[in-house]
Amino acid sequence: MKQIFRLAENFVSINGEGQHAGELALFLRFTGCNLRCSWCDTMWANTKGAPHRDTSLEELVGIVKTAMSRGVNNVTLTGGEPLLHEGMGSLIEALVPLGIRVEIETNGSVDISPFIVGNRPVFTVDYKLPSSGMEAHMRKENIPLLNEADTMKMVCGSTEDLQRAYEVINETKPRCKVYLSPVFGDIEPAEIVDFMKGKGLGNVRLQLQLHKFIWDPHKRGV
């Protein structure tokens, strides 16, 4: 049976976050998510009836090859929650051998172990903090699976979130890079920096979403 993916949008822009922030990347956004975070900025792609086009694996590979021919070295599979899609493993297996850096943005509630095989992709895994309303869904078993090429992202909207992030970091001792990112408009980056200084978080990085400073924070396709 032919695999069909619900593709909400695809576009080339810069990575707004993470270890390759500022680099050109192709974004493939898929619909559907099992969480409902209070501060979600892609809620439009999460509902059952979200706008999309049914796309085959072959079409997706073609989109990636076209981007590569234009000098793009990164592809980000995002959502929604991309790992909920049946066949995502097949897509990853098709993309990694092309030589492009394949990054999966996942919400922290889905088991990533089935995708940690062979020439695996790079993961950016969220850990949802209290203000998201979704911390109970976090799968801490994912964290030991992450290595230095991977990222754990912790979106902070309050002082309570910062304290909880500190506790989780101390408890799980991740080997990957850890980024604290402010909920846009809810907490000042300076407050996060002060917290990092106060707690001696020398291995943690502040992350600002570049695309929200370059373009309108609500603009799609950037």
Image (spheres, grey):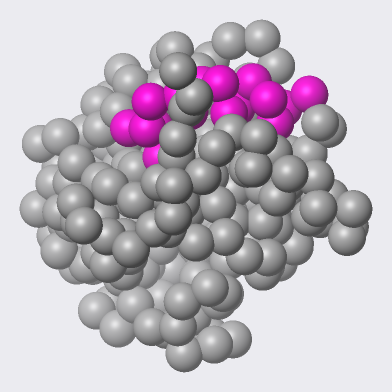
Residue 87 is inside the magenta segment: yes
Residue 7 locus on image (x, y percent): 46, 51
Where does residue 33 sit, x and y in percent of width and height?
A: 25, 46
Please state which of residues 201 and 39 is positioned toward the viewer in this rendering.
Answer: 39
Q: Quadrant of the N terminus?
A: top left
Res. 163 in view: no
In which quadrant will I find the C terminus? bottom right
Could one spot residue 139 in this view of the protein? yes
Query: Which residue appears at 64% of the width and 20% of the height?
Result: 93
Is residue 157 on the magenta stretch?
Answer: no
Span colored in magenta: 82-97
Q: Is residue 221 above or below residue 199?
A: below
Instruction: Identify the residue at image location x=70%, y=16%.
Output: 119
How far from the left and from the top, in percent, is residue 9?
A: 50, 61
The residue positioned 33% from the left and 21% from the top of the image is 111
108 sits to left or right of 56:
left
Question: In the rendered view, would you say 51 is above or below 62?
Answer: below
The quadrant where residue 161 appears = bottom left
